[in-house]
Image (cartoon, grey):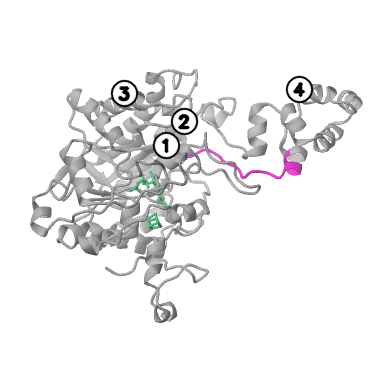
Amino acid sequence: MAGGHKSVRVPIPETRWPSRDEAARSLLYSPIRVGAVESRTRTWVPAMVPWRATDEGFVTPEVLEWYGRFADGKPGVLVVEATGIRDVPSGPLLRIGHDRFLPGLRDLVEVVRRRSEGETRLFIQCIDFLAVKRRPEKEKFIRRFLSLTPHHRAGLARLAGFERTAVSGTDDDVREAMLAISHTELLALLDPREVEDLEFGYRERVTDVHLPHVAELPRTLPPLFAAAARRARDAGFDGVELHFAHAYTMASFLSRTNTRADGYGGSPQGRVRLPLEVYGAARSSVGADFTLGCRYLGDEVIAGGSRLDDATFYGVEFARAGMDFLSISKGGKFDDAKQPHVGEAVYPYTGPSGHECMPTVRIDERGPFGRNLPLSAAIRAAVRTAGLATPVVGAGGINSFELAEAALRSGDCDFVAAARQSLADPDWWRKMEMGRGAEVRRCLFTNYCEGLDQKHVPVTCQLWDRDFTKSDTGRDSIKKTADGRRRLEPPPG
Ligand SMILES: Cc1cc2nc3c(=O)[nH]c(=O)nc-3n(C[C@H](O)[C@H](O)[C@H](O)COP(=O)(O)O)c2cc1C
Ligand code: SF4
């Protein structure tokens, strides 16, 4: 199981790189249609959040450089990071919830067109997420956040020495008593959700239908996604990827843990209903001649969560509805995430499901290489059996021509996506195509980059800094992180 064999560190397998001729004859470097556009190759850089937007969600010069650098490598498709569809503050993540974001997004499109010489198709991932609060200090939680109920007094009444407070104390007395008892006694007084709020931080769920804004999600989300998709089209993107994966709102609707009783949960048909309605609304707003697909999970890898059989059902439904591509990911859930420190927020890539999402060389003896391809293979097979030709994108530990080409040849996927290998060396697609694979800077799959994402600081790759020399560090032309310790951009190709 994921995360079990921490001591095992599988080596990066040696690989044989193709000659230029071999690459030219390969499936990987052959064109494929994806909705309204043709991709020159079957290579794909999936969404990666670099933490380079302004706090208001605008494109910055650093965002432009990040995507420009990926465009230098000329992948067939490049997907811009998870971009928020609401007009609400969400930290240095890109946003597309208002027309004021359009000029920056247009610049981004322009940079990618120019640096890929028109060869890369540019999509943008559109995301909605629910509230997640930092883990509170115990005192603050008990004195300020906890809503006292008779249940708390009843529990306190069972503890020796607190009977009187429980019966006749003021609310403040009860709160102070709760701070005086042991932590174990306190946890026994709280209901499971309150324990989570205290130990992990408050986190909204799609099943919190007592909250009006959560109950209303099936009404509010379709127009929000539709408007975001329309803006993406207006900004000049070639397509939109609806983010239905990982720990966020739409994935939570698809999850088997979604027990909503309002027709939007409780059964496979109920769980897929809102994602289909979101797709339908977005399709109506962008029209038939614009590429629109989604990223979703082939397996949530959590107790009681959706598995591959759910995912194949969803895939056929999405394809039948007219989605132009299905990009398959795995895991990345809050449900099994590690407890955060006080003052920090829970991060969905810290537990076993998170490890499956961005597998490292320590995951187990199988290692990360092509690990998640059985999911895209099964979903693709189900979609083909249903008579549909929708392209399926596979990802997870893909780091060589041999692996990518074999995945395409055996029908595991129609596009091969590589996130971390592309981060380690954005030119790697071109190097392989030019017969210069021996020059590829190979990803170590140890997740230094993901650790930076977790801290919400600019993501970089540890390998970029290997080229720092003394004279390098002194040069102004090399952009560094605010602390001056890391190269902000990959070394030139
Ligand atoms: C720094 C970082 C940020 C990521 N951000 C996103 C994101 O915004 N949306 C998304 O769907 N996946 C995101 N991912 C997951 C990747 O797209 C990819 O699915 C995962 O890393 C596994 O592929 P790989 O083995 O090729 O890296 C991110 C991964 C990393 C390392
Ligand atoms: S930081 Fe490590 S895991 Fe991330 S891209 Fe670089 S080498 Fe790969």
Mark 4: amino acid: His
The answer to which of marks 2 and 3 sits earlier in the sequence is 2
Residue 358, visible in the rendered structure: yes
| Quadrant hosting residue 251 | top left
The answer to which of marks 1 and 2 sits earlier in the sequence is 2
Single out the mark in the foreground, 1 or 4: 1
- Quadrant where the image shows the N terminus: top left
Image side of residue 283 versus residue 152, left or right = left
Are the two marked residues, 2 and 3, in contact with CB atoms closer than 8 angstroms? no
From the viewer's perspective, is residue 254 above or below residue 393?
above
Measured Cα–Cα span from mark 2 to mark 3? 18 Å
**Residue at 43% in and 43% down:** 85
The answer to which of marks 3 and 1 sits earlier in the sequence is 3
Image side of residue 456 versus residue 325, left or right = right
The answer to which of marks 2 and 4 sits earlier in the sequence is 4
From the viewer's perspective, is residue 42 above or below residue 459?
above
In this view, the residue in front, 123 or 185, is 185
Q: In the rendered image, which residue does mark 1 sit on?
A: 331
Q: In the rendered image, which residue does mark 3 sit on?
A: 313
Single out the mark in the foreground, 3 or 1: 1
Q: What element does badge 1 sit on? A: loop
Q: In the rendered image, which residue does mark 4 sit on?
A: 151
Residue 36, visible in the rendered structure: no
Are the two marked residues, 4 and 3, in contact with CB atoms closer than 8 angstroms? no
Image side of residue 376 versus residue 162, left or right = left
From the viewer's perspective, is residue 329 above or below residue 451?
above
**Residue at 88% in and 26% down:** 160
Measured Cα–Cα span from mark 4 to mark 3? 42 Å
Extent of the magenta region: 129-141
The answer to which of marks 1 and 4 sits earlier in the sequence is 4
Question: At which x and y percent is residue 178?
Answer: 80, 34
Q: What element does badge 3 sit on? A: helix
